[in-house]
Every structure is written in C-alpha cells, then in structure tokens.
Amino acid sequence: MEFSCQDFKVGKCGGQKVVDGESMPLVLNPAEPCENRVDSLLESLEKNKEWFEKMIIKNSAVLLRGFNVENAKEFNDIIEVLGWEDIRYVGPAPRTHVYKRVWTANEGPLSEFIYYHHEMVLFKESPKKVILFCEVPPPEGGETPFVPSFKITERMVEEFPEAVEEMEKKGLKYTFSAPSKSDVGSMRGRGWEDAFGTSDPVEAEKRANGLGMEVEWLPNNGMKTILGPRKLTRVFEGRKGRRMWFNTLVGMHGKEISSATMADGSEIDAGVVKRCGEIIEDESIQFKWEKGDVLFLDNMALFHGRRPSLPPRKVLVATCK
C-alpha cells in the first residue's frame, strides 16, 4: 500500500528504522506550513479515518508531528474524531485521569526503566491501539522505545526452537502481587483497590475473576493474582500472518513481585529468558519525544516501554479498541 494521502507530508525522526520495508514510525507532518494547527489536523483525520487506521496497521507506529497539539483537551479531540471505542486500562501502573478519555502514562519514578510490554497483554481483551501525547518533553532521556513483536518470535524460534515449542505447547502462567493502596514510588505500585475500583475484597475478587484471574489474599491485605494458561505467541488479522511474541515473559520472570512459569508450574530456563531480553533490546527502536508529538502504536504488533529521564516529563495516554 503506497502512501496516498494529500493531507499529510511524510517526514523523518530520530531513531526511525525500516522493518520489512516499512518505516517505524511512519512520520506524518502538515502538508503545508499553514496547516500546522489542531483544527486542520482534525479535518484531515476526519476525511481520512479509514486510510489512517490502515497506516497504523501497515507501519505499526504512526507519529503526528508539527501540528502544535498543546494539551489534554486537544489530544482528546484527536482521539474522538477517529471514532475508536475506549477501553479502560487495567494493570499495575499508577495513573491519574486527566480529561475525558485521557490519562497520565505510568507515574512511576522517572529514574526507573519501564520494561517493554504489550498493553494489557494478559487480559481477555487488550487495546488495539495505544496513543501517546507529549505535553512536556524531558530535557534528557525519557524515550518511548518500541519493538516489532514478530521479530522476537523469528529470532527466538531460530535460536531456541525446542524451548519455544515447549512453551507454545504448555502455555504460560503468571503471578503478580499488588498492595491494597497505590504506591506512586513504584512503576508497578498500583493498588488493587484502585485497579478494581473498590475497597471490598469480595467485589475485587469477583472483578478479577471476570478478567480471567484467580486470586490469593496475602497476610498484609495484598492481592496475588494468578493468570494462565496464556499463549506465548499470537497471530492477528490483517498483520501479514506475523507471529507476535505476545507475552510478558521477560518482564515478569523471576521478579520480586511477579513470576512467569510454564502453565503446568515447571520452570522456564533463565538463560532462555535472559537471551530473549537481549533480543528485545537489540530489536528496539528508540523514539525521542518532541513537544506536541502524538504517537499511535499498534498494540497487537509492538512492545513499548519508557527510558529513564530527568524531570520534567509529561506524556499522556489513551487506549482504544
């Protein structure tokens, strides 16, 4: 599918890579200098909704740059003009509601690296799109790196065919422990009361079960959730039959508050997990923010994360079906 929209001009950005012939991210700038306003952008998106969504699936990441998006309201206007249904975030990251469909991204300490992940990868329904808006770019660091998931599958199958086959056959099981109250001093510090919207343990467990989780209660009133079996890889419609590494094996294996094992409880070779992490890093695309950027990620196709940074850094997020 060739680029064929006269309302945008293709640009470039630092860290951009070509993967299987497609630019990641595809950078879209105003077609003319006089069209660098949000109202012009909204008109262009309204006229080209179907085309724009095809570009996200084709390139996995699309960056709108140079349109002078200023705040959460204007970011929300962009989300709403595209007509995609909202999906509520469920997960360990501490977040704050900002405006309508807009939330803060992970509010964990900027000094910490948020590991690569598909958003809500462990739940029955994951967002198809993760959209990020940079209101305040960091003075140093703070990139949002992303990784084409199918490349990880290709390389893991090449290096560890037997291990991949076993994990595919058995499936994976994960555990995660959360406190009752949120701890914004941790990038995984969201409490179960906030996550499930209730302080009633009975109701929280019911809601967790509805999302496909089993629950164990801890002595400190914390909640341990158990998820599995989950698939190692998945193939999604419209994405060239690519086998996505749609899991959080590296991010949860052997951690203090989380674990990842085979679904039957057998351990996964730590050397395999370590090498997988190296492959993910090697395939990553290091995207550096500029003020007003709006980045659309195909959550079915990409991992994303956050590099440590100096303050201030303000990136907002919306998740859509």
Image: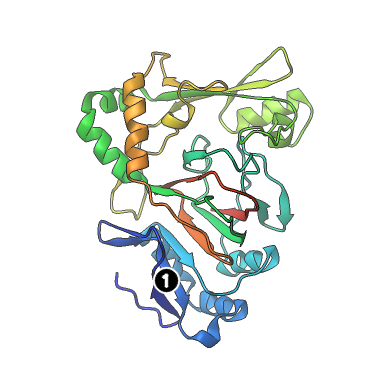
> Which residue: 36% across, 39% down?
280
**Residue 313's x, y, as percent?**
62, 53
Mark 1, residue position: 51
> Which residue: 52% across, 74% down?
66
Up/down of 192 relative to 87, above or below: above
* Res 40 seen here: yes
* Res 243 seen here: no
Up/down of 153 relative to 252, above or below: below
> Which residue: 36% across, 19% down?
268
Total number of numbered discs in the rendering = 1
**Residue 51's x, y, as percent?**
42, 71
Mark 1 neighbour class, 10 Å CA radius: few under 14, some 14 to 19, many 20 or more: few
> Quarter-wise, where is residue 77 in the image?
bottom right
Between 185 and 29, the one lying in front of the other is 185
Q: Is residue 128 left or right of residue 163?
A: right
* Coloring basis for residues: rainbow
Q: Quadrant of the N terminus?
A: bottom left
**Residue 100's x, y, as percent?**
71, 58
Q: Secondary structure at mark 1?
A: helix
**Residue 105's x, y, as percent?**
62, 49
> Which residue: 53% across, 36% down?
123
Between 70 and 196, the one lying in front of the other is 70
Inspect the image, locate mark 1, and give the three-letter code of the amino acid beneath it: Trp
Q: Is residue 43 left or right of residue 14?
A: right
Between 306 and 246, the one lying in front of the other is 306
